Amino acid sequence: EIVLTQSPATLSLSPGERATLSCRASQSVSNYLAWYQQKPGQAPRLLIYDASNRATGIPARFSGSGSGTDFTLTISSLEPEDFAVYFCQQRSNWPPTFGQGTKVEIK
Amino acid sequence: QVQLVESGGGVVQPGGSLRLSCAASGFTFSSYGIHWVRQAPGKGLEWVAFIRYDGSNKYYVDSVKGRFTISRDNSKNTLYLQMNSLRPDDTAVYYCAKNRMTYGSALDAFDIWGHGTMVTVSS
């Protein structure tokens, strides 16, 4: 199975700062990568699909980039509601797999 | 609105069984593949099983093959997960999640998730 490794494990930032999250795949997943946001006690929410496409209703401050094995989720200016855990997920090969998550916390 | 609502979780002893349900509303259920994804307490997300829009194909993570069965009733807009021979490491919140696209590839991003139902396997 394809292993997704996210870094860093924790990102400590202040509101208004830029967040850059990384997801690296153990083999190429083309552009078949998604990003999700999860807040405590809530289900994940789809942010980005196919590496760079924002899902319905997702603010423009969220952007995704990358292809092959290296991907980035960027939050251009952190809002208070953006402090959460972020997961990447590949849909290139069975089984679909998730990264272990990056927690974005308030500094 | 578009939503998925899970039910059927609870506490069960090792070796026991449980059936989860996922009721869909606000979209054409019969047009979408649906997944079960679980999350152990304090851990990350693990994909568990998938069923195509028409029930013609099913896929499972290796750790549940032979123990879990995914099914759907399109006339009732409901997805199921029959879980047998449960083990303590099956303890998790179980989410159902739909594919973003109708029909198409079985593998897709998951655009709508339920709120989850907790399954605890403990003696």
Image (spheres, rainbow, N blue to C red):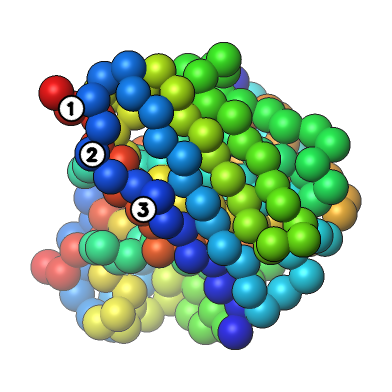
A94 horizontally vs A57: left or right: right
Tag 2: amino acid:
Val
Q: Secondary structure at mark 1?
A: loop
> Can you give x and y, in whole percent of width and height, for residue A78 in the image?
32, 78
Q: What residue lies at 51% left-to-right and 51% top-to-bottom?
A: B21
Tag 3: amino acid:
Thr
Q: Is B9 in front, or is A24?
A: B9
Q: Which residue is mark 3?
A: B117
Q: Secondary structure at mark 3?
A: strand
B11 horizontally vs B29: left or right: left
Mark seen at residue B122: 1
Give the foreground label among 3 and 2: 2
Q: What residue lies at 23% left-to-right and 39% top-to-bottom?
A: B11
How packed is label 1: few (under 14 Cα within 10 Å), some, or many (20 or more)?
some
Q: What residue lies at 32% left-to-right and 57% top-to-bottom?
A: A85
Instruction: Kindly identify which chain the residue marked by label 2 belongs to.
Output: B
> Can you give x and y, in whole percent of width and height, for residue A21 in the image?
41, 54
**Which numbered disc, 3 or 2, marks the residue that appears first in the sequence?**
2
Image quadrant in which you'd find residue B99: bottom right
How packed is label 3: few (under 14 Cα within 10 Å), some, or many (20 or more)?
many
> Can you give x and y, in whole percent of width and height, for residue B64 in the image?
50, 21
Q: Which residue is mark 2?
A: B11
In which quadrant is the N terminus of chain A drawn?
top right
Give the alpha-carbon distance from disc 1 to disc 3, as whole Å.
Answer: 16 Å
**Which numbered disc, 1 or 3, marks the residue that appears first in the sequence?**
3
Q: Secondary structure at mark 2?
A: strand
Q: What residue lies at 78% left-to-right and 70% top-to-bottom?
A: B28
Same subunit, labels 1 and 3: the answer reads yes
Let me know if residue A103 appears in the view: yes
Instruction: Kindly identify which chain the residue marked by label 1 belongs to.
Output: B
**Which numbered disc, 1 or 2, marks the residue that appears first in the sequence?**
2
